[in-house]
Image: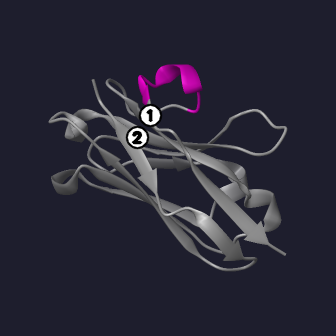
Amino acid sequence: QVQLVESGGGLVQGGGPLRLSCAASGRAFSTYAMAWFRQGPGKEREFVTHINWSGGSTFYADFVKGRFTISRDNAKNTVYRQMNSLNPEDAAVYYCAAAKFGRGSEEPGAYDYWGQGTQVTVSS
């Protein structure tokens, strides 16, 4: 069983940056594709970005391209997401997810493990 723990959420001023982290337990982290999803108030969970096992391949939802960057450090069992130019529409609970196989997907069903989420609030 893999446990994912997100951190770094909080209140940020509109236009500002924030970096989220997701720490994973277990020895197989370096073989997992990792992703971030988010769920805003009254909205369904939506895909944000994913990264393959090595970090060599990444993919972003259109609404975050150029503003968010995903990266990983397999030696630390951690995946990061740097968010810049945040706006109030980015306010949501952000979830980290891990997939045992594959290069990553936009579909939540492709992921085997999920974190509890971290709240991001953006002031206007």
Assign a secondary structure to mark 1.
loop
Which residue is at 51% across, 31% downward?
105
Q: What colour scheme governs how the chains and residues are painted in the rendered image of this protein?
A: one colour
Q: Are marks 2 and 1 in contact (CB under 8 Å)?
A: yes
Residue 103: x percent and y percent?
38, 33
Please give the label number shown on residue 3: none
Kind of residue sitting beneath label 1: Gly
Q: Secondary structure at mark 2?
A: strand
Q: Is residue 91 above or below residue 34?
A: below
Residue type highlighted by circle 2? Met
In the foreground, 43 or 30: 43
For residue 34, which numbered disc appears in the image? 2
Q: Quadrant of residue 108?
A: top right
Up-down relation of residue 99 to residue 58 (above or below): above
| Image position of 14 (left or right of 48) | right
Q: Residue at x 19, y 33 (%)?
A: 28
Magenta segment, which residues? 106-113
Closer to us: mark 2 or mark 1?
Answer: 2
